[in-house]
Amino acid sequence: MISTLLVANRGEIACRIFRTCRALGIATVAVYSDADADALHVREADTAVRLPGAAPADTYLRGDLVVRAALAAGADAVHPGYGFLSENAGFARAVQDAGLVWVGPPVKAIELMASKTRAKELMAAAGVPLLAPVDPARATTDDLPLLLKAAAGGGGRGMRIVRELAALPAELTAASAEAASAFGDGEVFAEPYVERGRHVEVQVMADGHGGIWALGTRDCSLQRRHQKVIEEAPAPGLDDELRDRLHDAAVAAAHAVGYQGAGTVEFLLTADGRPYFLEMNTRLQVEHPVTEAVFGLDLVALQLRIAEGEPLPTTAPPEPQGHAVEARLYAEDPARDWQPQTGALHTLDVPTAPGLRLDTGYTDGDTIGVHYDPMLAKVIAHAPTRTEAVRLLARALERARIHGPVTNRDLLVRSLRHPDFRAARLDTGFYDRHLDALTPTPAPDEAEPRLAALAAALADAAARQQAPGPARFGAWRNISSQPRTKRYRAEPDGTEHETAYRTTRTGPVPETGERVIAARPDHVTLEVGSVTRHFDIAAHGDKAYVDTATGSYTFTALPRFTDPTDRTAPGSLLAPMPGTVVRIADGLGAGASVEAGQPLIWLEAMKMEHRILAPATGTLTALHVAPGLQVEVGALLAVVQDVQEEPKQ
């Protein structure tokens, strides 16, 4: 029996595994990097062991250090979670060689499925339908578009779509570099890219006694950068014949490699419903909670049971009940090429209700750093029908209080309410087609954000009135006065709002005609026409976070007068996020000619590469970075002078 379990991971998945361990009476051990010293998973574990360093390559990807930590802490078993070393056969073997229980599939199964190229050969022999591979060296225009994928690992890292043959060499180089950075293996392969395909997968659970469960289907088609955003179970719109075919193929795949434990067999469905094997993930998936909700199971508990040598509790899985949908809440800005966001997470509060579940590795006051994936949490809703589950999840996200870095929360809500999603018209091109409509920039005179900015100004004035000391700037006066104005910039869209109100004997009177029923530092109630509106306000520095019944807003208070020195030279390329410069374009240096849209600099942040593009055709007049340099957000990277600009005299 397992008595003490080390989780060789961090964040949300470590916290989720610890939750099951507590329910089973198993002691827990966390490992942590220096960047995670005060992380939630460290605080929740019974024991924690430091892995010196911050970068994943120095910490969570060091299998030797993790095994040493398990032995030092007295653990008798290791669970890898997902990502990092979870599909690393060498790590699994090292765990077992150290006399520890490996909570995962056999080493041979990991080896067989670790390389997607070898896995496809094995699946072809087992009769599982496949897309024909394409040799990049012999690819022609008839093979386009192509999808480049990392042979080791997943999560969208090392993946590229190639639509022009001339771009293939550069994309191969970029994909290989990203794969090597993420997984320590730069092998990539190519296959046909299926336009408007669906990503459907089957959860399998296998014991060491010949028992295999196929636990239904999941649809994971809504993706950004080839990483899943919204997942659901069961996959909607599949007829019984197709569902049975997917289940049979998944079971055949598990049999072919002698699988044990939790695994996922992923398929691509073409527009006409033909399934093709993509890969088998020999680990627990991020989206496993939707399967747990529908089947009433704890998959981590089953993993532990199987690792202890026990069989599955029954020959057939339970009958599925209802529908479940999961949304991944990321610290990122979808309107700005999904740029990861960092900083203090002041508040993370998702409503609780029957059918709702929150899995997270963060809590109020934590800091979102630059070293790891930007996922803050997963919010899961389960209900009798798909319509009810989608509605419950959208409303929970809408009512959540999330104060800190920009997130994709609004995108998630709009996605769940989009007509195509509600009608289950799902495919991997969803965001390519609908992103602009899902990330609108509000007009300055739009009522809701204008009222939220007014509420922020009134709350600020109330806070100043209650502040101790003789000076009470913004206090309500008993005489008529000129209008008091306050300017805000909405984040992240940059829309500016100017609020104005007069102070009277009975309180503030907005110039725009609303009636102020109550104004406190943390809450404002306005009467707009005949409708009463409530606003909850939280202030942190120059930021004001305003939560309403139908949305949330973040404002930055602006000074009354613009600082003339607060300007950036035209053509300046600034770092959009903190990160590390991993590459610069060949031959790039001061005096080089560049084309508009040309990639100049590659930054790595939160396990993803981000390209800095030339804003215009012109001349690079300055280059301030080199590979390996760490930069902060807003740092000046380079300057490009537009060829149309008049030369300076």
Image: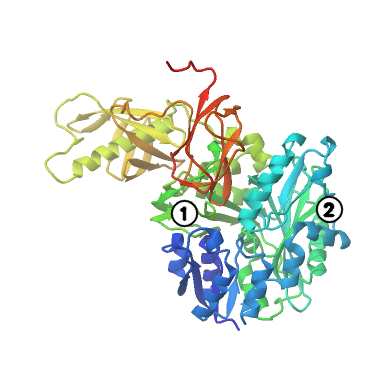
Res 42 → quadrant: bottom left
> Which numbered disc flags the more N-terminal residue, 1 or 2?
2
Q: Quadrant of residue 43?
A: bottom left
For disc 2, the marked residue is 130
Position of residue 562 in the picture relative to residue 243 (left or right): left
Name the spot of residue 90 as percent of width and height, x first: 67, 70
Answer whether labels 1 and 2 touch (C-beta < 8 Å): no
Quadrant location of the N terminus?
Answer: bottom right
Q: Give the numbered dot on residue 507.
A: none
| In the image: residue 192, left or right of residue 399 | right
Mark 2 falls on what kind of element?
Answer: loop
Against 512, is 134 above or below?
below
What residue do we see at 68% from left, 45% from top? 173
Instruction: Tell me the kind of residue under disc 1.
Output: Pro
The image shows residue 471 at horizontal and vertical percentages of 14, 39
User: What residue is pinned by disc 1?
Assistant: 351
SS at mark 1? Answer: loop
Q: Residue furthest left?
A: 470
Location of residue 589 by image quarter: top right
